[in-house]
Image: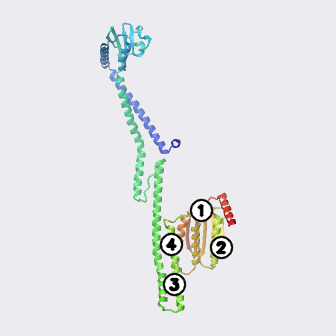
């Protein structure tokens, strides 16, 4: 009941439009009913008002009344029995009188006036009805106790009343349905257009959109279907792109693994065949080991990329104090680079508290990949610059380093970078990279979350308590 009242209090735009159509159709049906009943009533009245018709049928009524009186031995003063006949012929106004005395009157059958003297020139006039065609229609009647007369006025058109009402109701119902369907036709046509559009979209048509009309729920439905179709196509395109990229990477990786694998097999064949000295064996073992680690790194990157782009990949996002998290991550990154002989320059340009929602494990993996690439390809005599700032609702991490001048063969296709890109995009951010003038630039963005002082204060107190207990 409460849900029904809520729906009534907050009607939808489509229901209001439909209600408007119902009101218009009901008004048209009412006008149709009035017009039909009035027209048919007028027609029936015109037919029954003809003098010949009226006189002929009143005479028949008088004969029927005489037969009733004769068969039932009705006396002139037996108003109850006469009333029974009058009830059966309900459209007849009857006055029974003898000389100047009224014994029965349809309009006043229970009144004391019934046995008063008839003083008017036309009997019955004083009881409130006039006669048609300017003449009172009277007929003599033989009652059981003597002769009398009756005056008849009959509304023959009233006999058609039931038929007129039924026909009027039927015509008004037809009018309601026709008008309502005409008004509803526009929306029905739009519903059919939406249905047709859905069938077209099911076939995979990329450029088709259901036309948007009106501002009701049908408009919202069509717009939602268009957006869903667009999202679905984008998702399919993204899957196709990833699948194509994955295929290209696997092909390239297979080609690049073949060279170090051939070298490993060559060195191992030399060693096992005994065709080299002890010193040469050590040298060949070292080269084989280096090539084996090379292949391991390639396979690790391929695994990371496959994991990041796979359907089973899921993030375990949590909200963190952004300053605390990025301070720790940047500190770990620069410390690792400095241990490998790089100089670093950090510009931390955030002075306000902020929060960030991320999967720390995956974020650390991304930064480790960035650090590994710097260690492999960057010049050690250059400076690795790190910048952290807030911009347009995102926390931005920019890293720039100089690239070695010599040709780089190892992992030149950047599987690890592509895996990092996929991970950051699934966190709601972006990951871009480019090289220009022997400098490599990496940019990572993650959405900034609203800072909640109380939330992170409670978290810090819990961590502090845990450290003390430990």
Seen at 48% across and 59% down, the residue is: 231
Residue 119: x %, y % from top left: 41, 8
Looking at marks 1 and 4 on the same chain, the residue that comes earlier in the sequence is marked by: 4
- Given residues 32 and 155, the one toward you in this image is 155
Q: In the rendered image, which residue does mark 2 sit on?
A: 345
Helix or strand or loop: what does disc 4 sit on? helix
Residue 423: x %, y % from top left: 54, 67
Q: Is residue 449 left or right of residue 277?
A: right
Q: In the rendered image, which residue does mark 3 sit on?
A: 288
Residue extending farthest to the front is 469
Helix or strand or loop: what does disc 3 sit on? helix
Is the C-beta separation of discs 1 and 4 under 8 Å? no
Cα gap from disc 4 to disc 2, whole angstroms: 32 Å
Seen at 52% across and 86% down, the residue is: 285
Looking at marks 4 and 2 on the same chain, the residue that comes earlier in the sequence is marked by: 4
Cα gap from disc 3 to disc 1, whole angstroms: 43 Å
Q: Which of labels 4 and 2 is toward the front?
A: 4
Q: Which of labels 2 and 1 is toward the front?
A: 1
Cα gap from disc 1 to disc 4, whole angstroms: 25 Å
């Amino acid at each position: 009941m409460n849900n029904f009242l809520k729906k009534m209090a907050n009607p939808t735009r489509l229901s209001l439009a439909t209600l408007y159509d119902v009101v218009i159709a009901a008004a048209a049906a009412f006008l149709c009913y009035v017009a039909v009943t009035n027209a048919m009533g007028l027609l029936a009245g015109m037919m029954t008002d003809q003098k010949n018709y009226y006189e002929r049928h009143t005479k028949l009524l008088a004969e029927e009344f005489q037969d009733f009186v004769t068969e039932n031995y009705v006396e002139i003063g037996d108003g109850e029995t006469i009333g029974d006949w009058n009830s059966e012929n309900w459209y007849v106004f009857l006055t029974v009188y003898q000389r100047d005395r009224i014994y029965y009157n349809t309009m006043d059958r229970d009144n004391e006036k019934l046995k008063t003297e008839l003083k008017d020139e036309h009997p019955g006039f004083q009881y409130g009805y006039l006669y048609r065609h300017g003449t009172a229609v009277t007929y003599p009647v033989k009652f059981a106790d003597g002769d009398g007369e009756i005056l008849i006025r009959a509304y023959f058109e009233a006999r058609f009343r039931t038929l007129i009402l039924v026909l009027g109701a039927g015509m008004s119902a037809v009018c309601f349905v026709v008008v309502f369907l005409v008004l509803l036709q526009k929306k029905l046509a739009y519903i059919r257009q939406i249905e047709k559009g859905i069938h077209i979209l099911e076939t995979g048509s990329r450029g088709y959109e259901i036309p948007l009309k009106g501002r009701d729920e049908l408009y919202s439905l069509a717009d939602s279907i268009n957006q869903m179709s667009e999202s679905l196509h984008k998702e399919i395109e993204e899957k196709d792109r990833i699948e194509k990229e994955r295929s290209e990477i696997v092909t390239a990786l297979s080609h690049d693994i073949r060279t170090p694998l051939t070298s490993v097999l060559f060195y191992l064949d030399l060693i096992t065949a005994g065709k080299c000295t002890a010193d040469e064996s050590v040298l060949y073992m070292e080269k084989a080991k280096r090539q084996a680690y090379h292949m391991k790194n390639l396979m690790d990157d391929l695994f990371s990329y496959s994991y990041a782009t796979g359907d089973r990949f899921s993030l375990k996002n949590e909200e963190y104090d952004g300053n605390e998290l990025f301070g720790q991550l940047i500190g770990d990154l620069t410390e690792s680079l400095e241990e490998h002989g790089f100089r670093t320059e950090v510009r931390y340009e955030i002075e306000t508290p902020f929060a960030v929602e991320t999967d720390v494990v995956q974020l650390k993996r991304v930064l480790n990949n960035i650090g590994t690439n710097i260690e492999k390809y960057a010049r050690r005599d250059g400076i690795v610059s790190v910048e952290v700032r807030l911009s347009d609702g995102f926390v931005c991490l920019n890293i720039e380093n100089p690239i070695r001048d010599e040709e780089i063969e190892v992992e030149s296709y950047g599987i690890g970078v592509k895996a990092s890109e996929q991970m950051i995009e699934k966190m709601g951010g972006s990951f871009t990279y480019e090289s220009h003038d022997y400098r490599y630039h990496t940019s990572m963005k993650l959405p900034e979350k609203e800072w909640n002082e109380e939330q992170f204060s409670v978290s810090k107190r819990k961590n502090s308590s845990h450290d003390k207990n430990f």
